[in-house]
Amino acid sequence: MKKIGLFYSFNSNKTALIGKKIIEAFGDVDIEIINAEEVSEETFSKFDNIIAGVPTWFDGELPNYWDEFVPAMEDLNLKNKKVAIYGLGDQKGYPENFNDGIGLFAKLVEKQGAQVIGFTSIEGYTYENSAAQIGNQFCGLCLDQENQGRLSKKRIQDWVETLKKEFY
Ligand SMILES: Cc1cc2nc3c(=O)[nH]c(=O)nc-3n(C[C@H](O)[C@H](O)[C@H](O)COP(=O)(O)O)c2cc1C
């Protein structure tokens, strides 16, 4: 498998912790970690396999650090790149916008030509609305440390197994 670029905010608590668990689940796969707070066009586009950690903030919005990257992202050519997105959200606190960030981010990278991979089932979650939902799947890995933290380990392991098959 080609080297993976894993992007998450080094200032986040939960998103960074999950990033480390994802690395553990990959075992000896080559992964470079990049601080999403310092993401640039160059660092984002140097990988063919990308994992982005995107928690949802502000009632259905991207966190500041990703939002600030959006104008630069609009100039990127992401053709022939595979992007997998994991998100953190709170289905009880924000049932109308559960993990919207995953869906927003997926749209942004798809617009630049990337293929979003690592879809997961919506079964096992209770919410009203999610921009991450496409049909009966999420377009990424939805985690909820507030309400379903105990389910995360298995969800991560299953997701990583899929990514091992789907990445270049
Ligand atoms: C002010 C605020 C707004 C939030 N908005 C949403 C939201 O719209 N949808 C959602 O699913 N989770 C929302 N959350 C929950 C966070 O996504 C969740 O706590 C996540 O674990 C944060 O990860 P981080 O601390 O690594 O950034 C919000 C949390 C806060 C504090």
Image: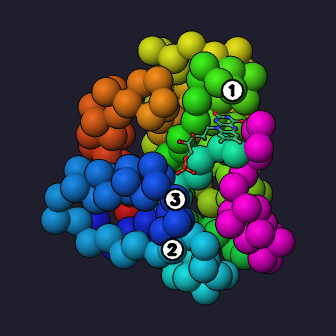
Q: Amino acid at mark 2?
A: Asn
Residue beneath the point at 50% across and 46% down: 86
| Residue for badge 3 | 12
On whether ligand 1 comes within 8 Å of the CB at mark 1, the answer is yes
Is residue 103 depicted above or below 40 in this figure?
A: above
Is residue 80 depicted above or below 34 in this figure?
A: above
Can I make out residue 87 in this image? yes
| Residue for badge 2 | 35
Q: Residue furthest left?
A: 28
Q: Amino acid at mark 1?
A: Tyr
Q: Dots 2 and 3: beta carbons under 8 Å?
A: no
Q: Marks 1 and 2, how far apart in space? A: 26 Å
Which percent across, then down, holds residue 49?
45, 65
| Residue for badge 1 | 94
Where on the picture, by quarter, is residue 95? top right
Label located before the other in sequence (3 or 1):
3
Q: Dots 1 and 2: beta carbons under 8 Å?
A: no
Is residue 9 depicted above or below 89 in this figure?
A: below
Which percent across, then down, holds residue 48?
48, 71
Can I make out residue 82 in this image? no
Q: Amino acid at mark 3?
A: Ser
On whether ligand 1 comes within 8 Å of the CB at mark 3, the answer is yes
Q: Using residue 100 as the reference point, say whether residue 3 is left or right of it.
A: left
Where on the picture, by quarter, is residue 40? bottom right
Residue 72 highlighted magenta (yes or no): yes
Q: Marks 2 and 3, how far apart in space? A: 10 Å
Q: Quadrant of the C terminus?
A: bottom left
- Give the quadrant of ligand 1: top right
What number is the disc on residue 30? Answer: none
Which percent across, then down, holds residue 15?
47, 52
Magenta-highlighted residues? 58-75
